[in-house]
Amino acid sequence: MREIEAKYRVHDPEAVLTALREAGVTLGEPVHQDDTAYAPPGWDPGQGKRGFTFARLRTEDGVHIVTAKTPLANAMECVEHETAVADRDGMHGVLTALGYVPSVRIVKSRRTGRSGPIAVCLDDVRGAGVFLELEVLVDDDRDGRAAQEELDAWARGLGTDLERVTETYDVLVRPVPA
């Protein structure tokens, strides 16, 4: 499966909640997600993300999920594989034994809903702010950038002040170098 997403910094969360309700999107109760992002062996941030496979280890409601993401056209279009694991510490050991390097911790409160095929997430990310994330999962050959533009048109249709961002949370939570 490919995950194609568009992400937006939210300046007025209440306005976005209202706009989502008016668009027929019902968000669930917040869930706590605690993620560790892992960089692949030999990767340097100056290289960009294309051509590398990254890992994420997430805990949500006591369930641990490991995800491998390989960016395609950009960091917001990835081939994705994931599975639940019984032991977070054990999986951390597996990833580091394979050469992956823990790069950043991402802690957030997430509320999710749907609008047809679009998964809608409202994330309050510790150290980065509030974001609206839209994503579709596809198993066909559709153009990722075109799909991202369709997601953007849907977001713009909400009529709220959204700032599109092209970085993933692992980049957004890192402090800016002085």
Image (cartoon, grey):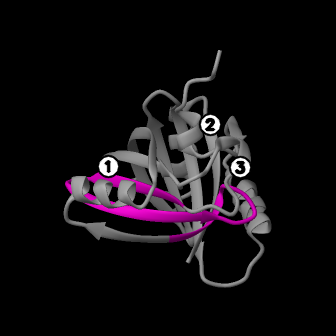
User: Viewed as shown, does residue 112 lie left or right of 31?
Assistant: right
Gap in Å between the C-alphas at discs 1 and 2? 20 Å
What residue is disc 3 on? Answer: 48
For disc 1, the neighbor class at 10 Å (few under 14, some 14 to 19, many from 20) is: few
- Label whose residue precedes the other's in the sequence (1 or 2): 2
Prevalent SS, magenta region: strand
Q: Residue flagged by tag 1: what amino acid is it?
A: Glu
Q: Which residues are magenta?
A: 54-80
What residue is disc 2 on? Answer: 9
Residue in front for this viewpoint, 126 or 124: 126
Where the C terminus falls, by quadrant? top right
For disc 2, the neighbor class at 10 Å (few under 14, some 14 to 19, many from 20) is: some
In magenta segment, residue 87: no
Q: Is residue 75 visible?
A: yes
- Label whose residue precedes the other's in the sequence (3 or 1): 1
User: Viewed as shown, does residue 159 lie left or right of 109?
Assistant: right
Where the N terminus falls, by quadrant? bottom right
Nearer the camera: disc 3 or disc 1: 3
List x then y, in percent, for residue 50: 70, 59
What residue is disc 1 on? Answer: 29
